[in-house]
């Protein structure tokens, strides 16, 4: 059970280094064991810093590392596929009391996580606007159509201006001109090689979310109109199609 | 139960992939994808970390597919947990098999190390003790991997910072036994030899002579960083974030003299320099490979 003790001590700084480790010169093995502790912790924090660069800029490197350290100790990865690591980091940030004053941080983290998910998601060809127009031409069939969404697509809804805050860190707009408390929505998607963040109004977000639940266009329109009576479905569908959200429109298609 | 595969018993395997050329290659990093496609540098092969490509789609696969058309490919695993006390993660092994099926690399290698325990992946190459129990376990794991992947793998000698009281064999002797019993090849990481020998006050020449040099399929060269242990003794860290050191180049020449020209990777994972800088190190390795081949041919 050598590895059990070694493993436990890697993530828990209060545990002693395994008693079985030796050094050629009789030097205190704790110092050498610390290399492993440091490699593990530093590499996992670095993985989070790579996935959440804007969060890191928002709170500063020291704060980010301290927060990431707590997350790493509480939720180390379970798989060598490190691109998945940090799925729960946004929820962790939401509960992380020292970050409570930066209330929008968790949503910016959600946006950054969606971007990495989109980056590595399966590839697919978005339905082009002309092909979609043909599908939509049959007005009798139209309400019965279901959309298959692009595998990279993710939908974000924030109580804050998380999308603008993120954009301000890409050289688009400034933090000063923002109304932080303005709720925002976005579609995160990678129709080809580049990940796009497409701001959506609440009605379009509601509609896209309904499509994502595999509702028919008719049902999605109806549920969107319950909260947005003046919803312009043609305009919204046009926007979503141009963003590459829809890869197929078929009647009665099984949810995939 | 160890089902030993002798190095020659490949009849039930898929046809042998074309081997890596005995030239210098570089780690393929996303920072260099475009540069490589645009400038098509004369590089012997590229090597990627398997785990980075266990994703469904996106730019990683897009670029690797294109680069793979023009360059020999080596895939290097960092998470198989060959040295782990617990059973291998069969789902992970299946994913690796799928990746190799997709890219048909000339070479697949892994580490003599453990990386997971109790459902946690540590993202680091952790050391194991060297005794008969560990030897049996490592050979069983390599058998499982080679049988699933239907190919010989190369096993990399580790860089370590501690030793274990339970060990009954020297590391190089342990590696020799593993290679002989499992039929895997050796990925000789010359930087790791330098780091390990410095850290444990061993003589690198003796260490190298104990290794199964006839089974070397690839060589790794990399840079390290320098720290001190609690008594002020030098402790080298296998950081892969610096150019290859003079000491490692010297050791490399010595290794080439013993085992002949072998595919050699300039391995870089941190402080990634511009492509021409990495290529210059590869060219230096290649000049030493050429010199070695000239001696072999004379």
Image (spheres, coloured by chain):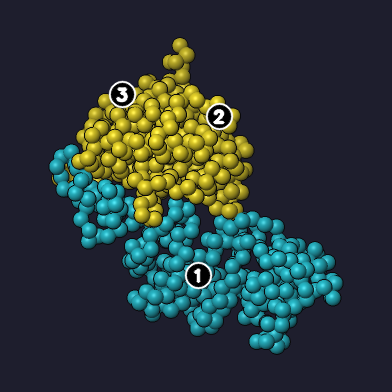
Chain colours: A cyan, B yellow
User: Would you name the residue on which mark 1 appears?
Assistant: A110
Q: Is residue B139 above or below residue A87?
A: above
- Badge nearest the viewer, 1 or 2: 2
Query: Would residue A10 appear left or right of B179 to someone viewing this image?
Result: left
* Residue B266 in view here: no
Q: Chain of mark 1?
A: A
Q: Residue at x 55, y 37 (%)?
A: B105
- Quadrant in which residue A202 is drawn: bottom right
Per the rendering, the mark at residue A54 is none
User: Would you name the residue on which mark 3 appears?
Assistant: B209
User: Would you name the residue on which mark 2 appears?
Assistant: B12
Which of A193 and B123 lies nearest the eye of the viewer? Answer: B123
Which of A143 and B106 lies nearest the eye of the viewer? Answer: A143
- Quadrant in which residue A74 is drawn: bottom left
* Same chain check for tags 1 and 3: no
Q: Is residue B206 above or below residue B101?
A: above
Badge 1 local density, few (<14 within 10 Å), some, or many (20+)? many
* Same chain check for tags 1 and 2: no
Q: Residue at x 52, y 46 (%)?
A: B94
**Real-space CA distance between mark 1 and mark 3, rounded to the nearest whole angstrom:** 53 Å
* Residue B96 point in image, percent of width and height: 51, 45
* Residue A31 point in image, percent of width and height: 21, 50
Q: Is residue A225 above or below residue B298?
A: below
**Real-space CA distance between mark 2 and mark 3, rounded to the nearest whole angstrom:** 33 Å
Badge 2 local density, few (<14 within 10 Å), some, or many (20+)? few
């Amino acid at each position: 059970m050598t590895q059990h003790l070694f493993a436990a001590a890697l993530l828990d700084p209060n545990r002693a280094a395994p008693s079985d480790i030796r050094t050629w010169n009789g030097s205190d093995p704790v110092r050498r064991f610390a290399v492993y502790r440091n490699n593990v912790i530093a590499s996992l924090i670095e993985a989070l810093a790579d996935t959440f660069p804007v969060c890191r800029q928002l709170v500063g490197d020291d704060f980010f590392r301290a927060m990431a350290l707590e997350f790493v100790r509480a939720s180390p990865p379970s798989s060598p596929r490190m691109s998945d690591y940090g799925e729960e980091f946004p929820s962790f940030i939401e509960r992380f009391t020292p970050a409570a004053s930066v209330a929008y941080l968790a949503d910016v983290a959600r946006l950054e996580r969606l971007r990495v998910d989109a980056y590595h998601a399966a590839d697919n060809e978005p339905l082009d606007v002309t092909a979609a127009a043909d599908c939509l031409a049959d007005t009798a069939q139209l309400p019965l159509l279901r959309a298959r969404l692009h595998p990279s697509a993710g939908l974000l809804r924030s109580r804050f201006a998380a999308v603008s805050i993120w954009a301000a860190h890409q050289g688009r707009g400034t933090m000063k001109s923002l109304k932080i408390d303005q709720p925002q929505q976005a579609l995160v998607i990678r129709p080809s090689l580049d990940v796009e963040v497409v701001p959506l109004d609440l009605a379009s977000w509601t509609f896209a979310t309904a499509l994502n639940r595999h509702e028919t266009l008719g049902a999605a329109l109806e549920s969107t109109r319950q909260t947005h009576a003046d919803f312009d479905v043609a305009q919204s569908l046009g926007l979503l199609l141009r963003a590459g959200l829809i890869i197929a429109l078929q009647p009665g298609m099984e949810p995939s | 139960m160890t089902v030993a595969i002798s190095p020659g018993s490949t009849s039930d395997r898929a046809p042998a992939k074309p081997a890596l050329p005995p030239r210098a290659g570089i780690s393929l990093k996303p920072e260099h994808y475009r540069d490589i496609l645009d400038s098509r540098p004369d590089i012997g092969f590229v090597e990627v970390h398997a785990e980075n490509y266990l994703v469904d789609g996106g730019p990683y696969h897009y670029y690797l597919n294109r680069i793979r058309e023009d360059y020999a490919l080596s895939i290097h695993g960092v998470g198989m947990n060959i040295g782990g006390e617990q059973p291998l993660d069969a789902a992970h092994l299946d994913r690796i098999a799928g990746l190799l099926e997709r890219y048909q690399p000339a070479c697949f290698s892994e580490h003599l190390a453990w990386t997971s325990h109790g459902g946690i992946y540590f993202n680091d190459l952790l050391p194991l003790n060297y005794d008969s129990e560990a030897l049996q376990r490592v050979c069983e794991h390599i058998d499982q991997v080679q049988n699933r992947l239907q190919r010989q793998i190369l096993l990399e000698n580790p860089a370590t910072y501690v030793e274990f009281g339970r060990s009954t064999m020297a590391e190089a002797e342990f590696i020799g036994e593993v290679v002989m019993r499992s039929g895997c090849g050796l990925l000789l990481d010359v930087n790791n030899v330098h780091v390990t020998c410095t850290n444990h006050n061993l003589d690198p020449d003796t260490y190298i002579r104990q290794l199964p040099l006839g089974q070397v399929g690839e060589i790794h060269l990399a840079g390290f960083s320098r720290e001190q242990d609690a008594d002020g003794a030098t402790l080298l860290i296998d950081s892969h974030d610096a150019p290859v050191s003079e000491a490692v180049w010297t050791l490399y020449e010595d290794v080439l003299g013993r085992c002949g020209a072998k595919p050699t990777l300039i391995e870089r994972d941190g402080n990634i320099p511009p492509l021409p800088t990495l290529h210059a190190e590869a060219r230096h390795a290649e000049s030493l490979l050429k010199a070695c081949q000239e001696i072999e041919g004379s």
